[in-house]
Amino acid sequence: MTLRSLLRHEAILALILALALAVLAIDNERFFTAANLLNQGRLMTEVGLIAVAMTFVIVTGGIDLSVGSILGLCAILIGVFWKTLGLPLPAAIGLSMAVGTLAGFVNGLIITRFRVPPLIATLATLALYRGLAEGISQAQSIRGYPKWFFVLGQGDFLGIPTQLWLLAAVAFAGFFVLRYTAFGRATYAIGNNEQGAAFSGIDVARTKLWIYSASGFVSSLAAVVFVSRVSTTRSDMGSGIELDVITAVVLGGTSIFGGRGLVVGTLLGLCLVQVLKNGLALSGVRGDGTIVIIGAVLIAAVLISNFLGRYSGD
């Protein structure tokens, strides 16, 4: 193994994660148990699903702040389509996911056709989609879902939470597409030099439309998992989740300026954030203290990676 590979951001992050696991396991005997770790897997699935697609978005040099609002909108629509409009629950789920995908497509359309910066465009749709969710729900929650629906969010398969299998499938697909396909190479090219990518024959607008539509799709998929896990729908679901998603992606080594990032790094960042949240909570650290520590770890990981990346010629 070369020095260059040893100093990759992902390797550094894996070492930090291993160190955090060791320290927290020593500090609290309840932390490093199968039941606790599997439960944390359940809790991080929604963020993880969205983070896979967000990796593509940020690799292009973009951002999607509307993912939490799309999640909330799709969550409330599942209940409205099913209970209020009387559709079969599978049809309600499918229609809700179609709306989520359309919401992502609208984001991409605003960004590519009207040349609105992604930060501004998705900040606006964050408010739009959340307002729609609140208007549709009228502050009412919807309960009473059939038992089979809870298998996705509360069940398990071969001793592993069902939603973790789903996260693994989405993460593998994202890893393969980004690393080994022409679409993935186009994504990196756009992030490195969008104008140069266009001159080289890449359809930049179409690629971005696919990526933002995929972001909407996985946000709607996360909504289905979320509703199944908590057994109810509310319009405030997903509030603030975009910050957890972006933290995991950036901590995982994806450059906010575009052109660099791996799904593996995103998953490592996601696990580190969840491990710190859970371990510090079990150790009695208050919520604000946890935020400070996670912020410090994020800064330290990025600084160490940048320093060693320059040293290794990355």
Image: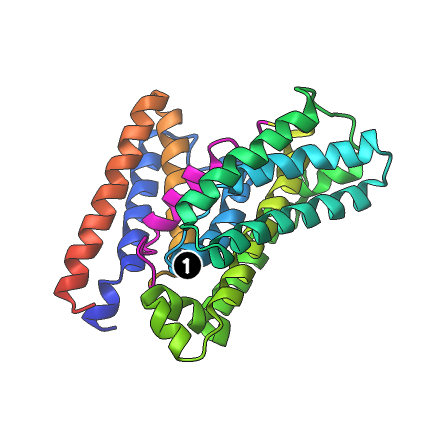
Please determine whether, in this image, residue 29 is positioned above or below residue 192.
above
Q: Position of residue 178 (x, y in %)?
A: 46, 67
Q: Is residue 37 visible?
A: no
Q: Is residue 67 left or right of residue 306?
A: right
Q: Is residue 99 left or right of residue 14?
A: right
Q: Nearer the viewer, residue 68 or 313?
A: 68
The residue pinned by badge 1 equals 264
Q: Is residue 19 visible?
A: yes
Residue lying at 51% horizontally and 58% vertically, measured from the top left? 113
Q: Residue furthest front?
A: 114
Residue lying at 41% horizontally and 73% vertically, measured from the top left? 198
Q: Position of residue 244 (x, y in %)?
A: 42, 39
Quarter where residue 155 is shown: top right
Quadrant containing the C terminus is: bottom left
Q: Position of residue 110 (x, y in %)?
A: 51, 51
Magenta-span inclusion, residue 244: yes
Which residues fall within the magenta stretch?
Answer: 236-259
Quadrant containing the N terminus is: bottom left
Few, some or many residues within 10 Å of mark 1 (<14, 14–19, 20+): some
Q: Nearer the viewer, residue 25 or 164?
A: 164
Count the marks. 1
Please determine whether, in this image, residue 314 is positioned above or below residue 90.
below
Magenta-span inclusion, residue 205: no
Q: Position of residue 293 (x, y in %)?
A: 27, 32
Please determine whether, in this image, residue 284 is positioned above or below residue 255.
above
Q: Is residue 193 left or right of residue 245?
A: left
Residue lying at 52% horizontally and 48% vertically, measured from the top left? 50
What amino acid is at disc 1? Answer: Val
Q: Circle 1 sits in a helix, a strand or a loop, which is it?
A: helix
Q: Coloured how?
A: rainbow
